[in-house]
Image: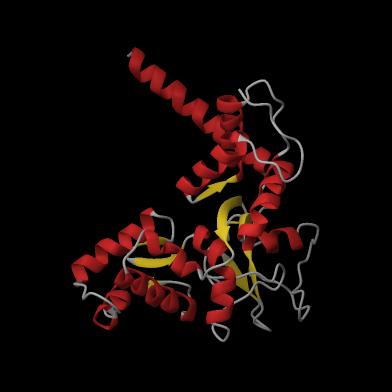
Amino acid sequence: MQSSARRTGVMTDVHRRFLQLLMTHGVLEEQDIQRLQKHCYMVHDRNATVEKLEDFINNINSVLESLYIEVKKGVTEDNGRPIYALVNLATTPVSKMASDFAENELDLFRKALELIVDSESGFASSTNILNLVDQLKGKKMKKKEAEQVLQKFVQNKWLIEKEGEFTLHSRAILEMEQYIRETYPDSVKMCNICHSLLIQPFSFQGQSCETCGIRMHLPCMAKYFQSSPEPHCPHCNDYWPHEIPEVFNQEKEKEREEAGFSKSSKKSLRSRQQ
């Protein structure tokens, strides 16, 4: 057993295991990160007091800083859930995927990414992506193979598929934001509140002012208009006609999930008893 370090810049087996498991998962929501942290303490230092998550991650980042790696916190575009991922700051994010994908597969991702960023909706159809297969670098790829590669991107949490269309997963947005900003400066869309990427400005992830055209993430908009009985655009001050979503509350969400789990458990128990 190893005594947990509280000094900044010192990593123990608890921290190292945490990093290994985070790398395996790619991206995790905050409640899952907290469970992961507690698991690592249980395995390596069960008698220690679990460090505050923010301090725990800051300690890790102080060590990783010289390696240009960081445990980065972000939020999902649709509901504002906090998420965490291990981000490589030293290399182009697409090249970071090189260990998992071949050259032609990486090129397919780049072309899908370009279609997604250039589109007004933040989605690219599988048809449009597959039509670019003949332009890929490296080994030739058949459309059937390309379909399988797209599913690999989904499984690895780089893309999300919805009814035959693809958009970026929260992991890709979190890890590739700087790359996307620099590579597509004329196409990239930004949230007027947090000034971060807004991939899907006219869907369940964002809304736009009908007068001046500024865009906002739903979670950012929810917080901005939280105490406004009559919401107005922060840019042009015109009335904001869209429905205002609720501010994400982790405690309330946890209560809903537990209540849902309790109901499903009781139902399952009753069915077993019949």
Quadrant of res 123: bottom left
Q: Can residue 247 be seen in the rendering of this structure?
A: no
Measured as percent of width and height from the top left, residue 237 is found at 78, 78
Residue 248 falls left or right of residue 170: right
Residue 26 falls left or right of residue 272: right
Residue 128 falls left or right of residue 228: left
Q: In this view, does 183 lie above or below 228?
A: below
Q: In this view, does 184 lie above or below 50?
A: below
Measured as percent of width and height from the top left, residue 97 is found at 42, 63
Q: In which quarter of the image is the C terminus?
A: top left
Measured as percent of width and height from the top left, residue 112 is found at 39, 74
Residue at image position (69%, 64%) is: 221
261 or 197, which lies in front? 197
243 or 212, which lies in front? 212
Q: In which quarter of the image is the N terminus?
A: top right
Q: Can residue 100 be seen in the rendering of this structure?
A: yes
Q: Is residue 240 above or below residue 134?
A: above
Measured as percent of width and height from the top left, residue 166 is found at 39, 67
Residue at image position (44%, 68%) is: 95
77 or 56, which lies in front? 56
Q: In this view, does 236 lie above or below 105?
A: below
Residue 186 falls left or right of residue 216: left
Outermost residue, bottom side: 186
The colour mode here is secondary structure
Quadrant of res 106: bottom left
69 or 157, which lies in front? 69
Residue at image position (51%, 71%) is: 92
